[in-house]
Every structure is written in structure tokens, then in C-alpha cells.
Amino acid sequence: MIFSQSKSLATVAFNMKPKRGPYGGGNQWLTQVSPYLERCGYAVTYDWKAKVDCVLGTHAGLGGGLTFSYDDVLRAKARNPRLRCIQRINDNDARKGTGEMDRFLAESNRAADHTVFVSAWLRDYHASRWFDATKPHSVITNGADPAIFHPIGAAPWSGAEPLRLVTHHWSDNPAKGFDVYAELDGLIADGVVRDVELWIIGRWPGEISWRAARTFPPASGHALAALLRQGHVGITASRFEPGAMHPVESMQCGLPLLYHADTGGTVELGKTFGVEFRDDLPSAVEEMKRRYQDLRDRVLREAPSGDLMAGQYRRIVQSLLCAS
């Protein structure tokens, strides 16, 4: 196969442009994978100005925001049968409370030669609706930038101080688990859960009046990571999250995970790095105290990371191009 640029291995096109600031997991994925591919010898573009060998596409919500569409990819593939397309799927209607996302992803998938899901839970969700699981696909867990979200400098829980539980959400959507955080806040304030602190970073529904929790304004990047490293355990009660970034960012900062049983793809990480809860928060907190050191050791050895994630995408790109 003759590639489009003599000084690069191949040209990879992303269908959205990188943005600065907290623009969600899709932007974090893009701002890590695109420079990683460039360091590995690929040319990267965000439009059709260059001749393209492979499309690495995602979505930017139902409101648009893509630099080119999957219909554009289909038309380009009709002209160039060697063009390959990878579609990253990281959403569904269950999380968003919509009736359009699943249909949009299914229609877009017509252009894909390989599909990447951010969790097995999300793959199975779509397979029960429209995705043919015999088609080429992978599950690649999201990762955060290891230059920012890392455990170096974090202070582990000694057992002689309150166990600090930390959560962070840019959105104040109640589905992020604020009912559980408010419940835990009350249990701490009433003395039912002892020797525990709760930190809330970000936004929350206006009707919540915290009684014991320590609150912080929204933060991202280095400022957020510095706060996370002051915690001991990340807690998430989000429902039906395909591949949430907030637990990944916490784990990369050295925090084991206390997670809700209905938190979608996060459960896959929680089974290795955390303690599950549903109705009995006090018991789950006590179990975390007992298992803390073992779980922290696992997080430090094996937690997801952006460099691991980017390498997995590179291998898929390489494999598709070699098979062309």
C-alpha cells in the first residue's frame, strides 16, 4: 500500500478538533491519542484537506460538533476502498435519558471497519439492541493523561485519621449519583458513619444543602489532580456510565474506588480496584477500610492510564492498515 505522505507512516483523520479545558471524555481521548500517534510516526489531521488512510472517529453529542460526518466517510470509502475507519463508541440513551443516541451510533457504525467500546458493559448494551458482536471490535478502557493524573505525592490513608472519600463532577445532573452523596453526607453528620470525610468537587443540584461534606468549586487538569491526591478513596454513584472519566482520574491518582452497583462500565474497574455498594453504605465503607491497603496496591500497579489506552488504538490502526 502506498501511503499519502512520504515522511509519515500513514495519515489518520479524527472527526473532531481538540479543545482546551474540560470538554468531557471524548476530548480527553482525542488530546491523548492524536499526539501519541504523531510521536509514533503518523500524520494527524482533523479534516479532509489531506489524503487520509484511516479515520479514527467518535461523536460530539447529538448537537453536532464533528468536523466531518460518517456519511462523508462512506462517500470517501466508495472512492477509495483502501480507506479504513475505526469508530469509538462511548455513549448510549440509558445514560443520557434520550431516544436518539443509540440510533445515531448504529447509523454511524455502517462506516466502521473496527468498533471500539469503552467498556464491555456498553458493548453488551448495544449488542442487545443493534450491534453485531461478530463484527471486528475491541473494548478499550478510557485513560487520563498520566502527566497530570498520577499518584506521585499522594498521601495514603494511615488508619489513624479519617478516611477521606472524594468525588468530582462537572455536571450537576442528578444521575451523577448525588442522591447517594447526600445520603452519605447525612450518615456522616448523624454519626452513623464515623471517622470518614466526604469531599465534593465540582457542581451539584441546587436543592442539596451539605451538612458535613467539604465542597470545592469545579476543577480540571493539574488543579483537580492535586485535590484528588489529597483524598484516600474515590467514590462514584453515577448510574449507567459507559466509561466515566472521574473514577479513572481518581484511580490514576492512587485512590481505590467505592462504586455503585448500577454504575455501568465502571463496575468492570471496580471489581478489581474497589468495593461495591447498593443499599448499605456503612458496611461498604467499613469493608473499604479493611481492604484499603490491598486495593491501593492494585491501583498503583494496574490502574488504567492514557498511555496504555493510546497504545491500544495505535495497534488497531496499524493492524487495519497492514490488512488493507
Image (spheres, grey):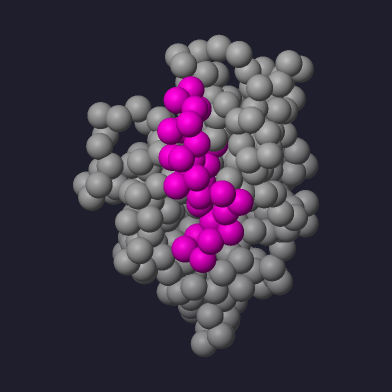
The quadrant in which residue 35 appears is top right
Residue 218 in picture, x, y percent from top left: 69, 68
Q: Was residue 213 drawn as part of the magenta stretch in this picture?
A: no
Instruction: Please report the residue visible at 37 percent of the width from the left and 42 percent of the height from the top.
Output: 109
- Residue 78 or residue 86, whichever sits in front: 78
In reply to whether residue 60 is colored magenta, the answer given is: yes
Name the residue: 73% across, 16% down.
6
| Image quarter (top left, top right, bottom left or bottom right) of the N terminus | top right
- Nearest the viewer among 244 and 64 is 64
Q: Is residue 287 visible?
A: no
Percent position of residue 57, x then y: 52, 42
Q: In front: 137, or 268?
A: 137
Residue 157 locus on image (x, y percent): 64, 47
What span is in magenta? 56-83
* Residue 100 in view (yes/no): yes
User: In the orientation shown, which residue stands out farthest toward the left?
Assistant: 128
- 164 horizontally vs 285: left or right: right
Between 185 and 306, the one nearer to me in the picture:
306
**Residue 289 in picture, x, y percent from top left:** 50, 49
Rendering quarter of residue 51? top right
Which quadrant of the figure has residue 144? top right
Q: Quick check: 297 above or below 213?
A: above
